[in-house]
Amino acid sequence: METNSKAQIVATIGPASKDIAILEKMLDHKMDVARLNFSWGTHEEHAQYIKDIRSSADKIGRKIPIIQDLSGPRIQEGAGHTYNQEVEVITEKDLSDLKFGIDQGVDYVALSFVGSGSDIKKLRAHMQEMGKIIPIIAKIERRIAIDNLDEIIGEADAIMVARGDLGSELPIETIPFAQQDIIKRCNEAGKPVIVATQMMLSMKENPEPTRAEVTDVAFAIIEGADAVMLSEESASGKYPLEAVTIMERIIKESEKYITRPNRKSL
């Protein structure tokens, strides 16, 4: 992992941001990493996203890492989803998606609903069988993952604080402090940490974030996050470019008040 003085922006690519003109503008406005959410979409659609991300990055002379985010054992329920506690963390769908991601040359694989370091070891073993080891991002979104956090940090290549599902596992008032603790322990271990989920969710429908969302992004940076992530805001929202632009402004302003020259880059 390289070091970087600026926190990175991870933007999820989807129907709202798939147009090459939009992608190029998002890259111009400091999008650093692209995420593909494999809970949705076909391999054909994701292959096109990957092709367009790479061609857009090549045009402006940038290298943009791509994260393949595996869906895990989710049960879709309307607009949301639930986690099935009784099945394996790595599903048959995940393995099919993983093979596709390896063939496409993705840069990172994010594993959903990690419970322990052994889950990461299992995914890495599957990668080895498929012929290529890719850095693994462990998503912290279960209570048991908090209990096994040091073990997970030690085994993973990076950590994602997935606050949506974590908020269903922990009392909601404890989420800010769980986030702060995860960031602190990742910083101490020298592992990149991404803060994700509902960072500027109102921008799915509105051209500006709420004041509370601005504060949320700023304090993630101040606490030591190496990256902050856009999900629906950039994948399916009305204002993907504006979301990236405003997030970059918040990062730039927040970093005036802290000194952290050794942020980890994805």
Image: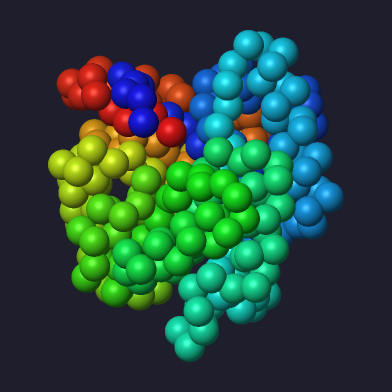
Q: Quadrant of the N terminus?
A: top left
| Residue 141 visible to an observer of this rendering | no
Q: Is residue 159 above or below residue 151?
A: above
Task: Pinpoint residue 46: horizontal percent, then vertical percent.
Answer: 75, 47
Quarter holding residue 96? bottom right
Residue at 61% from the left image edge and 41% from the top image edge: 106
Residue 20 locus on image (x, y percent): 78, 26
Tell me where residue 125 appears, x and y as whole percent: 48, 61
- Closer-to-camera residue (117/245): 117
Q: Residue at x 75, y 23 (%)?
A: 55
The colour scheme applied to this rendered structure is rainbow
The outermost residue toward the bottom is: 86
Residue closest to the eye, 204 or 137: 137
Position of residue 52 in the picture relative to residue 26 (left or right): right
Residue at 60%, 50% in the rendered image: 131
Is residue 175 shown above or below 86?
above
The picture places residue 199, in percent across and down from the top left corner, at: 44, 46
Please tell me whether residue 243 is drawn above or below residue 253 in the rendered image. below
Q: Quadrant of the C terminus?
A: top left
Residue at screen point 62% across, 65% down = 94
Q: Nearer the viewer, residue 106 or 232?
A: 106
Q: Is residue 250 left or right of residue 65?
A: left
Left or right: 117, with 247 as reference point: left
Quadrant in the picture for residue 34: top right
Task: Please say whether residue 96 is visible from this viewpoint.
Answer: yes
Instruction: Give the total number of marks visible in the rendering.
Output: 0
